[in-house]
Image: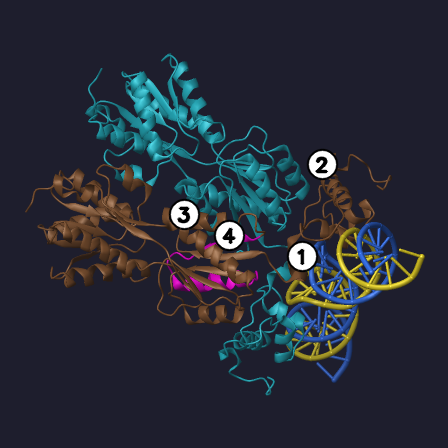
Chain colours: A cyan, B brown, C blue, D yellow
Amino acid sequence: MKNEDEPKDKRLKPGEAQKLTMAEVAKYVGVSAMTVSRAFRQDASVSEETRKRIMEAVDALGYVLDLSAGSLSSRRSGFIAALVPSINNSNFSDTARGMTDALQNTGLQLLLGYTDYSAEKEEELIEAMLRRRPEGIILTGGSHTARARRMLAKAGIPVVETWELPENPINQVVGFSNSEAMALLVRTLASQGYRKFGYIGGTTARDTRGSQRRSGFQKTVEELGLGPGRMISFGVPPITMEQGGQAIVSLLERWPDTEVVLCVSDLSAFGAIMECTRRGMKVPKDIAIAGFGDYEISSICHPRITTINVDCYGIGRQAAARLMDALHTGEATGDEITLTGYKVVLRESTDRNGAPTV
Amino acid sequence: MKNEDEPKDKRLKPGEAQKLTMAEVAKYVGVSAMTVSRAFRQDASVSEETRKRIMEAVDALGYVLDLSAGSLSSRRSGFIAALVPSINNSNFSDTARGMTDALQNTGLQLLLGYTDYSAEKEEELIEAMLRRRPEGIILTGGSHTARARRMLAKAGIPVVETWELPENPINQVVGFSNSEAMALLVRTLASQGYRKFGYIGGTTARDTRGSQRRSGFQKTVEELGLGPGRMISFGVPPITMEQGGQAIVSLLERWPDTEVVLCVSDLSAFGAIMECTRRGMKVPKDIAIAGFGDYEISSICHPRITTINVDCYGIGRQAAARLMDALHTGEATGDEITLTGYKVVLRESTDRNGAPTV
DNA sequence: CCTAAAATTGTTATCGATATCATCTTGCCG
DNA sequence: CGGCAAGATGATATCGATAACAATTTTAGG
């Protein structure tokens, strides 16, 4: 039975007293705080009738559960931490979305951070995240500072590394071999008759996936007996569209007879293609160009860009799923490696039919 | 003086007991927990020597502060909630980055959520966020459900609405008039001699900024005496590059003599331009096309796209800054409106010199 | 109609930090 | 040289929920 002295239109008052607690809701309904707490969870045993009365009161009073209090006593924060290099990159924002979607209706919330491709920034962020006592953490790549590894080990929570296949995985891995993927692209293009390969990527090793793609390129070009690849490093990763354009200019000045140029990402490939177009070169007739990542732009632009399609969304989704598995099974599952798919997508930008046979 | 019975190499053991608390660090150092707590804050008065000893112990033991406990007793969560329509859109991810950057080193952490352009999803997310007791909240746009507004009012925290100028602001606003911005673009192009205007946007009103741009377009075209604009609605917002391409086909089928087409965003404009190029139409010679948002792609692609440059990053940065002002001044600041800049960027895609005068 | 099992609800202690006030030094100044 | 302010540290209560167990009511079966 409701308190009659409690005004019915309470929720309508604007500047009303804040800081409503569960105990007050309980008093209002005439039950204990514990029962209110139970009513908020689907599994807990509360009679349908009581739950209904409680929820009406919650509605009327405008009570909002306080999870920070709850997570202290239950020792479950309800957070999953995730670190990506950059959110201003659609590959990683797709991954972030995959994680968010997978966490939908699980009561878990994503705490997202951007490392800016820096292991030091990552270390800082890991510490900041651990202060919130996440139940699991998702990282990009396998390159971490020693202190970061120590903190993670000590935290005793499941860790998922994504987007790569680290040599020394901390725990679980959801990703693919960037080096193999790039190798596949090289072989595919070589089989189409291309011989003189160029490569455009960033200058530093900060972007470990970029480095792996580069080494996959170099190794494969040499394996195929096509001599050393023509490598141009331009700009601090992540390399922009504009830098892709500048890079191809350098590359062609140095090696004018290059037949096909592979780029660390579709963005730089797009920049390169546009720069060529602007300079009157035809792609792929005068030069073929390919990217990596299969960004939306690559299937739309003209010419459409040959690339490696990566399951960005799936990486995020599966990383979150693996984490939840680990949480449910009491972290008993082995440290598995989940391979995610990739495939070559051949498009106009490397279409030999449009290009003169050398 | 350190406890001698505490092993020195404690941190080196891998599977060590988790759940280290401040009290244990305190015991290790020989001070009270309160002193350890103080040592973690720069302002608190602890002697330099004690702080040093504590920090050494923290390092040695591998202790990580527990903010969920701290925020309960201090009644400050350290969270700022932010909701954006989508993170897979570089305009909003720039805004998110602006917020993150502004919160750097403030001890505040961003809790990010995606509404998918849906007010219902926004309502859900607001509730989920409020359960974490954020100290402030940043929203995109001014369109919220009644219950969302009620919850926000009751929460008693500063609210910043961004990216628009809502008619009934909840509290503070950081944004610009999408309708005015689009009107400016129309007038600018009209002054260059364009007369037959088309518009491409999404089908529903879910994207309120899109709707405002559309109405700004319509109003201005009529004001200029150029008759009703030729409007094509295509696809559920956010409209993709591909949909931009499909939309322009419909538009030109219906009104083949259209001279210039304005698009709700650069992405659809890019798609439209590529589709035209693919069909053998020259942009801007045969038709001029403009976008909105000044995405990276627009300054790189060929032809470069005329657009409205919006200070996405600044919106995020300023929104966070206004929120922090409100927190510091005890929320005493009036509910101000902070206007952010925008400007027309004329580029090749509407360059009349390249187009035959009709 | 009685009893054991199941369902529902309540009581109390507790999660791990911090606010607050108390206590104890230390240093400075008249 | 006394006294008081400032600085450093400690003791205790508390933030708001939930775990764990106890108590009570309901249900089912014989």
Location of mark 4 (residue): A103
Q: What chain does mark 3 sit on?
A: B
The residue where tag 3 is placed is B94
Q: Which mark is residue B14?
A: 2
Q: Give the residues in magenta.
A: B108-135
Observer able to see residue B27: yes
Q: Are marks 2 and 3 on the same chain?
A: yes
Chain under disc 2: B
Q: Residues within 10 Å of mark 1 (few under 14, many from 20)?
A: some
Residue A212 location (% of width, % of height): 47, 26
Look at label 4 and name its amino acid: Leu
Q: Are marks 4 and 2 on the same chain?
A: no
Which mark is in front, 1 or 4? Answer: 1
Tell me the amino acid under the disc marked 1.
Answer: Gly
Helix, strand or loop for disc 2: loop
SS class, disc 1: helix
Q: At 46% across and 59% down in the image, what residue appears?
A: B138
Q: CA distance from mark 2 to mark 1?
A: 27 Å
Q: Earlier in the sequence, mark 2 or mark 3?
A: 2
Query: Dot 2: within a 10 Å radius of its alpha carbon, few (fewer than 14), some, or many (20 or more) residues?
Result: few
Q: Nearer the viewer, mark 4 or mark 3?
A: 3
Front in this rendered view, residue B221 or B271: B221
Are there few (<14), some (14-19), or many (20+) residues within 10 Å of tag 4?
some
Check contact, mark 1 vs mark 4: CB within 8 A: no
Q: CA distance from mark 4 to mark 3?
A: 24 Å
Which corner quadrant holds the N terminus of chain B? top right
Q: Which mark is residue B70?
A: 1
Q: Classify mark 3: residues with Cα within 10 Å, few (<14), some (14-19) or many (20+).
A: many
Q: Which of the chains bears the disc numbered 4? A: A
Q: Report the Cα–Cα distance between label 1 and label 3.
A: 31 Å
Q: Earlier in the sequence, mark 1 or mark 3?
A: 1
Instruction: Say which chain tag 1 marks.
Output: B
